[in-house]
Image (cartoon, rainbow, N blue to C red):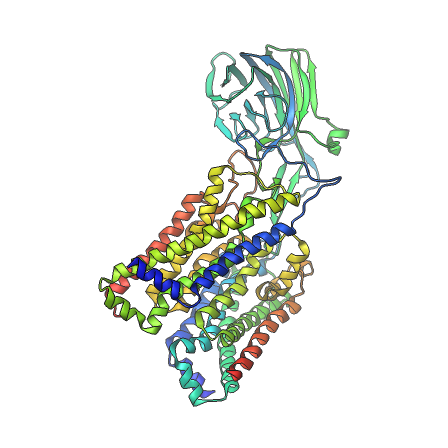
């Protein structure tokens, strides 16, 4: 646990990634704010960009060590795989959720300041959307870590994670069948998870807000568990 | 040197497989969605929308008081009044108002018969865009301001439109040639009034486009030569709206020297409302994009990781040439990948869609070629950008992340999120995502009032201009990479 923290602390990369996460999320959100039907949702659009950074932070943490060869030192120091994975997950969760809290807080504040139809910050819908977004970003980071553990190659893992997050929403509109569209929406880690942000008429979505976030959690935990299992085997 | 780099790409683990995967993803997506699409209307297959003389889908429905014209001739008339109604417009959507939509039209027309889609030329008064001369659905020229008198003159295949404020001094608007116009044509007076169309964003990032019925009524006098009119509702289907049944049916009324015509519809190029656009079949390119970005980022950064770059640079000490050669190989390989993917997907998807009863708006050969080549260029420029990033950053993961953030994310924000339209347009003007404009098959038209938006696939930049933006970004990163490699040590 301590060793993992030292590795994170002594390099500039992880901190830069977290700062980047806050910056792009807040900037993206501020750009999107509008007095539309769902100003809360609009003010959280930066999460769409921030998720890439969060996922990469996860990928970098384990798969990145495979790129530099540092992983061999890590395994020599702590031969048991799972404690390392747990330690990494814990620090990742802590770091990303901290950054996400700042990013989402800034986004919501920007929305409140710019949009006149914004609901009160303490209303349950705003709180749900904001807390959900923080959770979502943390889960995406874990997802990245899990995919990294599965593929053990940083660029491949990054490609796989980002395409899972971005390709599905991009191709959904082109599916002819409504059922297919809704099924994909429910399965996609980003589409399902981000339904937590909708405050106007969430019942119209193919999946409920918390159920959607659970889908993202399932992706994150599923890849982590299978990645951990594979790490032990190899 | 190119040869050496090609060998490296060929033998880079997984790169050839990855490019094959990119092709497979695109083709599989195109064929799957095409095979799953079935379109039908009440009572069988849907009738095809009319197609104009230049091969594009058009809207062609209006009220037409006409008579045959053999050979050359002239028609003159004055529009004394033009009024209209819009049913239940926003913001309250609760009453019928006495207003006209900006492109409500009343004027004179020469048309090759009354079949929708047939060639025509017209000079007309609009509600908010003054006098125009329009022909064959896409041609549109502005006339002098303040004119109420209109004149159309035919000589052979050439039709000239004039307008005047007082009926004595005439201004020529333009002369157009309608190729293959037969000796006998229909000449007459017409009125059209397009639907009042608005789009509202829904909370999910999609848009709901609503069209409301409108009608325009114009009174013409001083019609010369007059008489002998037959009325036709060109392109009219169905029983009509309640307004037409209970208040004002479309048609023509002659009283004294004047002619009153009421009508709805439009005479204009159609957009995506006629059917899905061609580029929809290659939407799988998005998945391919990720694959290509990973391969391109790895192509250079893998060398750094393994130290192969030192060998490469020793073999060719003039470093910038290595960087450029690698860029060339990457560009060519990914361009061919996109090209093959498009050539495999398009013909089969189109056939499958047609078999399923779906009408895909036809495009000319030039546009089709641009889209096929565009598939290659979109992939190769994204690859070039990721590669340039790789040279600059020397880290595969950082390079591919930046490429995704610059190319894919802005496009997604602009087309499938709840980002406001104006912000979306800016994203598609300045980021490398602008290049996707090369795939747009149906342009936005100035003479159609439609809420064109990126979410519907209408890009703010022209196809090649958009691609130019992406090309600039890609070149800039490769150039940065050249600078970086000449300065730094490997």
Q: Please say if B95 is above or below B303.
A: above
Apparent side of residue A157 relative to residue B216 in the rendered image (left or right): left
Image coordinates of residue A53 in percent, x first then y, are 47, 68
Count the marks: 0
Nearest the viewer among A87 and A122 is A87
Image coordinates of residue A41 in percent, x first then y, are 58, 60
Apparent side of residue A46 relative to residue B481 in the rendered image (left or right): right
Nearest the viewer among A131 and B457 is B457
Res B355 → quadrant: top right
x 51%, y 40%: residue? B443
Image coordinates of residue B238 in percent, x first then y, are 73, 32
Q: Please say if A209 is above or below B235.
A: below
x 44%, y 52%: residue? B378
Res B254 → quadrant: top right
Nearest the viewer among A47 and B48 is B48
Apparent side of residue B346 relative to residue B378 in the rendered image (left or right): right
User: Residue placed farthest to the right in the image?
Assistant: B246
Image coordinates of residue B267 in percent, x first then y, are 59, 29
User: Residue placed farthest to the left in the image?
Assistant: B317
Please indicate, yes or no, whether residue B434 appears anywhere in the rendered image.
no
Please indicate, yes or no, whether residue B237 appears anywhere in the rendered image.
yes
């Amino acid at each position: 646990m301590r060793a993992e923290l030292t590795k994170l602390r002594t390099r500039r990369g992880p901190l830069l990634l977290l700062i980047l996460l806050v910056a792009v999320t807040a900037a993206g959100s501020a750009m999107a704010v509008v007095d539309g039907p769902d100003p809360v949702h609009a003010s959280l659009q930066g999460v769409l960009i921030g998720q890439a950074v969060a996922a990469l932070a996860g990928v970098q943490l384990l798969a990145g060590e495979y790129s530099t060869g540092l992983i061999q030192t890590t395994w020599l120091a702590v031969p048991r795989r799972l404690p390392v994975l747990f330690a990494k997950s814990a620090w990742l969760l802590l770091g990303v959720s901290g950054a996400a809290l700042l990013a989402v807080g800034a986004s919501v504040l920007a929305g409140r300041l710019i949009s006149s139809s914004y609901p009160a910050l303490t209303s349950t819908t705003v709180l749900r959307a904001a807390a959900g977004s923080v959770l979502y970003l943390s889960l995406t980071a874990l997802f990245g870590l899990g995919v990294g553990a599965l593929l053990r190659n940083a660029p491949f893992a990054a490609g796989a994670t980002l395409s899972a997050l971005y390709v599905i929403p991009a191709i959904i509109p082109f599916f002819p069948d409504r059922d297919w569209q809704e099924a994909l929406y429910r399965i996609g880690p980003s589409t399902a998870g981000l339904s937590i942000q909708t405050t106007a008429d969430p019942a119209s979505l193919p999946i409920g807000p918390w159920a959607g976030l659970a889908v993202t959690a399932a992706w994150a935990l599923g890849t982590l568990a299978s990645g951990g299992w594979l790490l032990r085997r190899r | 040197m190119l040869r050496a780099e090609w060998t490296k790409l060929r033998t880079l683990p997984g790169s050839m497989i990855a490019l094959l995967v990119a092709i497979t993803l695109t083709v599989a997506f195109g064929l799957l969605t095409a095979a799953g699409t079935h379109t039908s209307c009440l009572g069988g297959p849907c009738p095809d929308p009319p197609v104009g003389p230049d091969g594009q889908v058009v809207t062609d429905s209006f009220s037409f008081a006409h008579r045959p014209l053999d050979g050359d001739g002239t028609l003159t008339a004055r529009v004394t009044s033009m009024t209209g109604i819009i049913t239940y417009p926003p913001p309250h959507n609760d009453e019928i108002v006495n207003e006209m939509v900006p492109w409500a039209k009343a004027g004179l027309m020469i048309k090759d018969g009354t079949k929708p889609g047939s060639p025509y030329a017209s000079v007309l008064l609009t509600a908010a865009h003054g006098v125009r001369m329009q022909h064959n659905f896409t041609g549109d020229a502005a006339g002098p301001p303040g004119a109420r008198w209109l004149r159309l003159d035919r000589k052979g295949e050439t039709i000239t439109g004039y307008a005047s404020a007082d009926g004595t001094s005439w201004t020529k608007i333009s002369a157009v040639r309608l190729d293959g116009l037969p000796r006998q044509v229909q000449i007459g007076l017409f009125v059209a009034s397009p639907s009042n169309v608005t789009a509202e964003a829904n909370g999910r990032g999609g848009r709901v486009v609503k069209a409301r019925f409108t009608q325009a009524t114009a009174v013409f006098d001083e019609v010369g030569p007059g008489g002998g009119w037959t009325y036709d509702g060109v392109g009219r289907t169905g029983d009509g709206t309640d307004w037409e049944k209970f208040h004002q049916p479309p048609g023509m009324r002659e009283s004294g020297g004047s002619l009153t015509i009421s009508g709805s519809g439009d005479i204009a190029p159609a957009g995506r409302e006629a059917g899905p656009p061609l580029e929809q079949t290659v939407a799988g390119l998005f998945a391919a994009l990720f694959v290509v970005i990973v391969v391109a980022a790895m192509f250079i950064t893998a060398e750094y990781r393994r130290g192969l770059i030192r060998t490469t640079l020793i073999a060719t000490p003039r470093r910038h040439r290595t960087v450029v050669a690698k860029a060339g190989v990457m560009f060519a390989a990914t361009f061919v990948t996109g090209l093959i993917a498009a050539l495999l997907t398009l013909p089969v998807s189109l056939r499958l869609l047609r078999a399923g009863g779906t009408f895909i708006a036809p495009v000319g050969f030039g546009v089709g070629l641009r889209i096929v080549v565009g598939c290659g260029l979109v992939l190769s420029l994204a690859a070039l950008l990721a590669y340039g990033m790789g040279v600059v950053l020397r880290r595969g993961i950082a390079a591919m992340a930046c490429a995704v953030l610059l190319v894919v994310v802005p496009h997604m924000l602009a087309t499938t999120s709840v980002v406001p339209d104006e912000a979306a347009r800016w994203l598609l003007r300045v980021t490398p995502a602008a290049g996707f404009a090369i795939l747009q098959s149906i342009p936005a038209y100035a003479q159609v009032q439609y809420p064109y938006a990126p979410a519907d696939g209408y890009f703010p930049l022209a196809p090649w201009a958009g691609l130019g933006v992406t090309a600039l970004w890609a070149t800039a990163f490769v150039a940065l990479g050249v600078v970086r490699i000449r300065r730094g040590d490997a």
